[in-house]
Image (cartoon, rainbow, N blue to C red):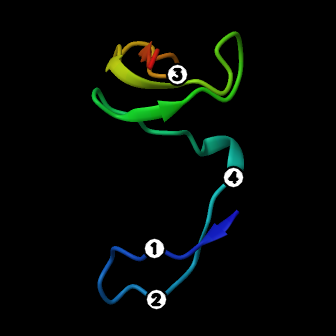
Amino acid sequence: MIFKPTNLDGYDDTLGIDRSMIVKYVEQGDSVKIVEGKYQGETGLVMKVDPNNVTKPNVRIDST
């Protein structure tokens, strides 16, 4: 994957990175949509992110 950083002033080069190195980043309080599993298609709020297991944040599903 090739991309060009937009937040580095004066840096005009492109960078290459392997797709397997890219992960989604969420923080407590972020709104998310579940894309896979039992609750697929539901939206929720990230309640907690365990620093030892960042791949599975604790999400509360919006029941409204």
Under mark 2, the amino acid is Asp
**Reading the chain from its start, which is encountered first: label 3 or label 1?**
1
**Disc 2 from disc 3: Cα separation:** 32 Å
For residue 18, which numbered disc appears in the image? Answer: 4
Residue contact at pointers 2 and 3, CB within 8 angstroms: no
User: Which percent across, then down, holds residue 59?
Assistant: 43, 16
Q: Secondary structure at mark 2?
A: loop
**Reading the chain from its start, which is encountered first: label 2 or label 1?**
1
Under mark 4, the amino acid is Asp
**Disc 4 from disc 1: Cα separation:** 16 Å
Q: Secondary structure at mark 1?
A: loop
Under mark 3, the amino acid is Thr
Circle 2: is it few (<14), some (14-19), or many (20+) Cα within 10 Å? few
Give the residue number, with chain letter if any, for mark 2. 12
Give the residue number, with chain letter if any, for mark 3. 55
Mark 4 vs mark 3: in front? 3
Relative side of 32 to 8, left or right: right
**Disc 3 from disc 1: Cα separation:** 24 Å
